[in-house]
Amino acid sequence: MRKLRVVLCGVAGVLAASGAVLVPLTQTATAAPAACSSGYVGLTYDDGPNAGNTNNLLNALRQNGLRATMFNTGQNAAANPGLVRAQVDAGMWVANHSYTHPHMLTLSSAQMSSELSRTQSAIQAGGGGTPVLFRPPYGETNATLQSAASALGMRTIIWDVDSQDWNGATTAQIAQRAGTLTNGQIILMHDQYATTVAAIPQIAADLRNRGLCAGMISPTTGRAVAPGGGTNPTTPPPTGGSCTATYSEGQKWTDRFNGQVAVTGTNNWAVTVTFRAPQRVIATWNTTVTWDATGYVMTARPNGNGNTFGFTVQHGGNWTWPSLTCTAT
């Protein structure tokens, strides 16, 4: 974006009144830095995935052209495998944040290893690949814990900037702290806060204005680098593109109703469909689906039968249509 400053001569009013054309005497144009000319930073989100907020977080990141590293707890990954896959589909990198989020230094070496290995398994089961990065809860680490992580092929990652979102920071404060990031640095944020999601457009704009891009965290150096600038097998690059999912009401009965979703923009998609309690889906067609732990968030993907799929909902007295989010994969 170019900013133009024009200084006019003192007789501008007279010239304007006479119909003369006003010509700038001086002008200064300031162009924004070229994309990524100042380097890369690591955006990280701990403690996911969460049924109540992860989709909002992923949508905001995708809409603002950002990628991030998601340090998932194993228990949340096990409870929400569909959201682990959604993180991957949105182009994020998935990493390990222990299974139960304990104070790791109070554990024995065997317990440390169990926390890490169980999380690896939960993330793998959800389609998140094999993490190569580990962030210890509370940033607490020592040689024993780092050795346990290394034994599983992971580098321990802390942070350079703490957003303080966990401590009640406002959206403006989170964005301000992100504004202090410099090349290679990493910021700590969390999956579960609405204020953190709301800060994403501001963070994206600030990075662009400073010539910085959101990159991956190198398992070799532990610093933020260009995507593909290191080895991280957990997540492929995003495929780009966009898609739209449109809901159409189908047949209705006293106890249930049909819905149909048409996807446009791509043949490779994932549609997140969120139902409302006490609704229950009793049938689906033309799609392959997975569910989160709540039983209300369904992720639908193509199964070779085109870009239109449907479902039957036992409404339980709630006739509200489901909400939809479409991601190109």
Image (cartoon, rainbow, N blue to C red):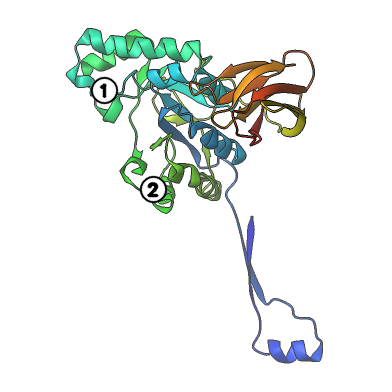
Where residue 53 sits in the image (x, y, percent)? 48, 35
Q: Is residue 148 left or right of residue 252?
A: left
**Is 152 placed above or below 249 here?**
above
**Is 213 placed above or below 73 here?**
below
Q: How many marks?
A: 2
Residue 246 visible in rendering = yes
Q: Which residue is mark 2?
A: 177
Question: In which quadrant will I find the N terminus?
Answer: bottom right
The single residue placed furthest to the front in the displayed view is 254
Residue 265 visible in rendering = no
Where residue 253 sits in the image (x, y, percent)? 72, 27
Do the residues under discs 1 and 2 have CB atoms within 8 angstroms?
no
Q: Is residue 115 left or right of residue 207?
A: left
Q: Residue at x 53, y 39 (%)?
A: 213
Where residue 76 sits in the image (x, y, percent)? 41, 22
Badge nearest the viewer, 1 or 2: 1
Q: Earlier in the sequence, mark 1 or mark 2?
A: 1
**Is 170 placed above or below 18 here?**
above
How far apart are labels 1 and 2 at the CA level? 26 Å
**Is 231 placed above or below 252 here?**
above
Q: Which mark is residue 301?
A: none
Q: Which residue is mark 1?
A: 102
Residue 152: quarter of image: top left
Residue 228: quarter of image: top right
Give, as a three-letter code, the residue at label 2.
Arg
Where residue 30 sits in the image (x, y, percent)? 60, 59
Give, as a three-letter code, the residue at label 1.
Pro
Q: 62 or 254: which is nearer to us?
A: 254
Q: Residue at x 60, y 38 (%)?
A: 65
Residue 4: quarter of image: bottom right
Mark 1: secondary structure:
loop
Q: Residues within 10 Å of mark 2 (few under 14, many from 20)?
A: some
